[in-house]
Image: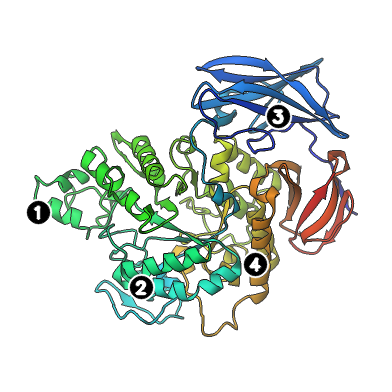
């Protein structure tokens, strides 16, 4: 027997263009805010409560238009401050309810979850229609044209699996290079992605390169600057952008800055680091590691070299000569913080401003493994790698593998098994604490070079993997596929997941899954509702969730299940019927009704 699911019938507003006339206004500009209210939701008066110069002000909502199933209300506000913080209130006989970014509440709420608009230049528009492909350079493709084996390396045959946690971790060398990546651009373009995110490409003494020995050149064992410039040129012809990876928090112990600092106590480089005679090697390392000297941003010279000066590291690689489309910042939440020092916001905003000076059309996204909402207040990072509000809760909801511990949270216990309600609550917790544009500017991922592979989290369940991939391609944000996921690569933890792709023998590739991913990428990049639409939850059950992505041009309904389901979902009271099935389960009309024997999904184009 199918379970009939009721639609969530509540007033709705989010930060998308359907509800906010300008999400990146100038100070003094007037903006229009809209809110939609189902006919079934009765109230006598509605207001918006907004802070102006830190003082709360209240303005009445006026009806804009009536529809068959809902009415639209609006209000016009002047932008007085960099941050405009607001929420709605609906009152009537026996009714007193607040609508903020977290939801609808029948009790007083504080301002931490209010809607936010930021009066600073907006994110680059191109990220809205982008799907990225994450490449760990040592493991993607080897050209055979570079014959350099570094002295730190333990060479491995290309198709061997990485060894377990041991002295070899971080030192195993497979020899992937940028020439190899360029030779595979047909493959990357064929998948349909239009961006490549590289983990670091600077010289170092490890295979991961998060311990840079220089930020001034591309690692010669990857082909150096020549190979990078050639790759950038050819990727640009295919309209594929390149995102770099920068460790603003630390460098490697082999960096010439540290060498100079040790040699000359009066050198400017001496001020770049924290020194402590109690430590065996004399300086503070990130997480106490000798291999990763921590930067001291009390040094104005360091700030200039990293991002302030005309020829700084941040500015150089996004300049027209090198042409990177932006930066992913490693351990962004830790940058500038050390014991009593906290230069984090200054550095974060300094990097943002430096990038804007050189090219306002670049993207700045940070790794925030443990999320801090103020980092995404619109003044610093434009987005984060969305572990907290997407990947972790999704792992916990779809979890098939209790051996995968912590969900990349550093927790010493297995992932919990949560319900659809807990999944959505986790997502709302993240979304409601930041401006809408910081959500859409964040990177969506099922896994990364630092985590287990999703296929392993799901114990090889291909149907669940397709459902998860569908969610990533339809949820607000910038999807990022870790190279190899599209062919079903596995891996139980970071280094184990950094497996090579066997280009010579593709018999073990999951070709069917590749085709599904390719189709989903095309849908993500071609539908305005997924590019510019908002997010409205319509059904949340233990084993499945359903939501709308609505823009001014079109509306799409998405349903994702983690398990076999029998469902009957009536969307008629939303004023919609299904116009076309874009992906997954075929349905028609206003009733979404089907049985599934496995995890499943549906993406449907709607019409009024």
Badge 2 is on which residue? Answer: 172
* Mark 2 residue crowding within 10 angstroms, few (<14) / some (14–19) / many (20+): many
Q: CA distance from mark 2 to mark 1?
A: 31 Å
Question: Which mark lies nearer to you, 3 or 1?
Answer: 3
**Does residue 167 appear anywhere in the picture?**
no
Disc 4 residue crowd, few under 14, some 14–19, many 20+, Cα 10 Å:
some
Residue 200: quadrant of the picture: bottom left
Q: Which residue is mark 4?
A: 518
Q: Residue at label 1?
A: 263
> Where residue 34 is drawn, which disc sits there?
3
- Real-space Cα separation, disc 1 to disc 4, in angstroms: 54 Å
Indicate the position of residue 105 as horizontal and vertical percent values: 70, 26
Q: Earlier in the sequence, mark 3 or mark 1?
A: 3
**Left or right for 581, reference 362:** right
Q: Earlier in the sequence, mark 2 or mark 3?
A: 3
Specify whether 211 is left or right of 407. Answer: left
For marks 2 and 1 on the same chain, the one whose residue lies earlier in the sequence: 2
Q: Could you say which is closer to the camera, residue 67 or residue 491?
A: 67
What colour scheme governs how the chains and residues are painted in the rendered image of this protein? Answer: rainbow
Q: CA distance from mark 3 to mark 1?
A: 63 Å
């Amino acid at each position: 027997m199918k379970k009939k699911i009721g639609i969530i019938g509540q007033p709705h507003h989010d930060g998308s263009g359907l509800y906010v006339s300008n999400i990146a206004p100038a100070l003094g500009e007037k903006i229009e805010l809209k809110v939609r209210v189902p006919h079934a939701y009765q109230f006598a008066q509605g207001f918006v409560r907004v802070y102006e110069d830190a003082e709360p002000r209240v303005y009445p909502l006026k009806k804009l238009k009536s529809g068959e199933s809902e009415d639209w209300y609006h209000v016009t506000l002047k932008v007085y401050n960099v941050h405009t913080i607001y929420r709605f209130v609906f009152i009537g006989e026996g009714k007193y309810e607040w609508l903020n970014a977290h939801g609808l509440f029948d009790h007083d709420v504080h301002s931490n979850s209010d809607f936010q608009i930021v009066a600073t230049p907006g994110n680059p528009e191109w990220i809205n229609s982008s799907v990225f492909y994450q490449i760990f350079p040592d493991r993607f493709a080897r050209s055979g044209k570079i014959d350099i084996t570094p002295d730190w390396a333990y060479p491995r045959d290309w198709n061997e699996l990485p060894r377990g946690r041991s002295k070899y971790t971080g030192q195993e060398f497979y020899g992937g290079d940028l020439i190899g990546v360029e030779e595979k651009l047909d493959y990357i373009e064929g998948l349909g992605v239009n961006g490549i995110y590289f983990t670091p490409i600077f010289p170092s003494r490890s295979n991961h390169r998060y311990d840079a020995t220089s930020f001034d050149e591309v690692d010669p064992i990857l082909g150096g600057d020549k190979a990078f410039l050639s790759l950038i040129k050819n990727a640009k012809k295919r309209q594929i952008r390149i995102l770099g990876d920068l460790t603003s928090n630390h460098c490697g112990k082999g960096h010439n800055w540290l060498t100079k600092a040790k040699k000359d106590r009066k050198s400017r480089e001496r001020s770049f680091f924290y020194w402590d005679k109690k430590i065996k090697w004399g300086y503070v390392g990130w997480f106490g590691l000798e291999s990763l000297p921590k930067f001291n941003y009390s040094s104005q010279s360091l700030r200039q070299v990293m991002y302030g000066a005309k020829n700084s590291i941040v500015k150089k690689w996004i300049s027209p000569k090198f042409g990177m489309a932006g930066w992913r910042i490693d351990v962004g939440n830790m940058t500038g913080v050390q014991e009593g020092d906290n230069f984090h916001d200054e550095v974060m905003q300094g990097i943002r401003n430096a990038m804007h000076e050189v090219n306002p059309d670049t993207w700045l996204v940070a790794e925030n493994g443990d999320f801090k909402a103020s980092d995404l207040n619109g003044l610093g990072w434009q987005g984060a790698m969305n572990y907290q509000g997407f990947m972790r809760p999704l792992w916990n909801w779809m979890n098939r593998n209790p051996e995968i511990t912590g969900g990349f949270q550093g927790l010493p216990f297995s992932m919990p098994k949560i319900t659809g309600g807990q999944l959505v609550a986790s997502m709302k917790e993240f979304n409601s604490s930041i401006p809408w544009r910081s959500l859409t500017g964040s990177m969506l991922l099922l896994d990364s070079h630092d985590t287990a592979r999703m296929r392993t989290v799901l114990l090889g369940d291909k149907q669940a993997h397709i459902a998860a991939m569908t969610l990533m391609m339809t949820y607000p944000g910038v999807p990022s596929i870790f190279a190899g996921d599209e062919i079903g690569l596995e891996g139980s933890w970071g280094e184990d997941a950094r497996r090579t792709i066997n280009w010579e023998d593709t018999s073990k590739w999951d070709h069917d899954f590749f085709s599904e991913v390719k189709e989903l990428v095309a849908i993500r990049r071609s539908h305005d509702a997924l590019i510019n639409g908002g997010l409205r939850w319509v059904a949340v059950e233990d084993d499945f969730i359903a939501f709308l992505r609505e823009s001014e041009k079109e509306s799409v309904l998405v349903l994702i299940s983690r398990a076999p389901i029998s469902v009957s979902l009536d969307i008629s009271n939303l004023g919609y019927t299904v116009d076309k099935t874009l992906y997954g389960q075929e349905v028609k009309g206003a009733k979404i009704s089907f049985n599934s024997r496995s995890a499943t999904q549906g993406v449907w184009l709607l019409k009024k």
